[in-house]
Amino acid sequence: MHQLINNSLNAIWIVGEEGKIYYCNRACLELLRVFSPENILNKNFCIFLPPDIHEICKDRLRRVLEKKEQLELLETKMFRNDGEVIEVELRTAPCYLGDKIFAQVIVQDITHRKKTEKLLNDQGKLASIGQISASIAHEIKNPLTSVKGFQLLKESQPHFYLDIMESELDKALATIQNLLHVSKPDLFEEPLVPIELCKELNSLLFLFQEKLYNVNTELLFRDSERNLVGKRNLLLKAFFNLIKNALEAIPDKGDIKIEHYYQNGFINIKICDTGVGISEDMLKKLGTPFLSTKSEGTGLGLTQVFTTIHEHGGSIFVQSIIGRGTVFHVQLPCD
Ligand SMILES: Nc1ncnc2c1ncn2[C@@H]1O[C@H](COP(=O)(O)OP(=O)(O)OP(=O)(O)O)[C@@H](O)[C@H]1O
Ligand SMILES: [Mg+2]
């Protein structure tokens, strides 16, 4: 029995009165990055848990030891011995050793699951921002277009202000049209076609010849025979926007690396630059329409990228370090 628990792949703690750790199996030592059981036995299990849930845990322990209850799952953070914080799920039930009752706690590391959930949630949020912007744009476009019709007034009653009104209206309509373009790719029923992405990425780079003068480009294309099926114009526009951003992030000299490879049913495209980087605060908001740090930027580039990749069932991961550079990692499903 002892062997079974010790070799179990689940991290298991046996906790006694006052929260003292009575036993801890091998998987648990590994999870907590504790080298030997002596470093942990007889310590209070609360030292691995955040202070705000200590009271809750004491109460749970009481319920197990006194009322012999099997408890509902508890999600919390946990501190490893080296200070790293992980997300865990605690499953707790009574267990008997001889005639004494203890709490058996199974600890499951759910850090990865939590990260994925957050990512899906963020992508969902971005998709809905895109949808909301598209419907607002649609609503505003109609009245603006009818106001534009009144420019006929100019002919009967010319006025300097009417010219300004006309040009400002044109700007507003162009902005709205852009927003519609990027936030509702479905508006343009583009057919799904096979796309030779490596070839297309090569051609896209040619469009930036002038800007590539000070930038060293490296292309690492693997698995280029894998054909992607998608909306060609939308996808090319998305990669154009990503490459454009990468180039604009490099003020003087720098490097851009584009990788292409296939893994587990997905084509992966990584666009890495050694540019200015993106702050943490900004990272969280990427994809929101009109978010831009550039004087001439519309802030719609990434909205187009996120909605397009999302529409193709893909995902985007962004990593960045200020002053060092940025990686945009796109994954697109492929047979
Ligand atoms: N590779 C990158 N490196 C550093 N910052 C980036 C990078 N990509 C995007 N950003 C940041 O994200 C912001 C939004 O990008 P987005 O492409 O949506 O708009 P923009 O580039 O400002 O304008 P537009 O694309 O319309 O010209 C940028 O202003 C910039 O601050
Ligand atoms: Mg851009």
Image: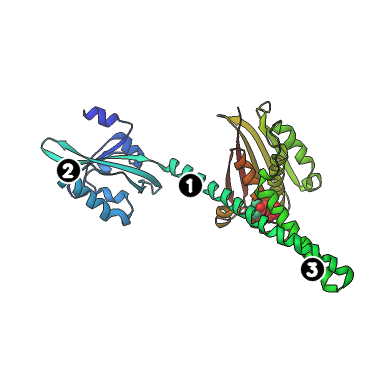
Q: Amino acid at mark 1?
A: Lys
Tag 3 near tag 1, CB within 8 Å: no
Measure the C-alpha gap from mark 1 to mark 2.
35 Å
Residue behind mark 1: 118
Q: Amino acid at mark 2?
A: Lys
First in sequence: mark 2 or mark 3? 2
Front-lying residue, 295 or 180: 180
Position in image of residue 189 (x %, y %):
70, 40
Seen at 60% across and 54% down, the residue is 132
Asked which secondary structure carries label 1, the reply is helix
Residue at disc 2, CB closer than 8 Å to ligand 1: no
Asked which secondary structure carries label 2, the reply is loop
Q: Amino acid at mark 3?
A: Met
Asked which secondary structure carries label 3, the reply is helix
Q: Which mark is residue 165?
A: 3
First in sequence: mark 3 or mark 1? 1
Q: Is residue 286 visible?
A: no
Measure the C-alpha gap from mark 3 to mark 1.
45 Å
- Placement of 77 over or under 232, stated as above or below: below
Residue behind mark 2: 68
Measure the C-alpha gap from mark 2 to mark 3.
77 Å
First in sequence: mark 1 or mark 2? 2
Judge left or right: residue 250 versus residue 123: right
- Placement of 99 over or under 224, stated as above or below: below
Position in image of residue 20 (x %, y %):
21, 47
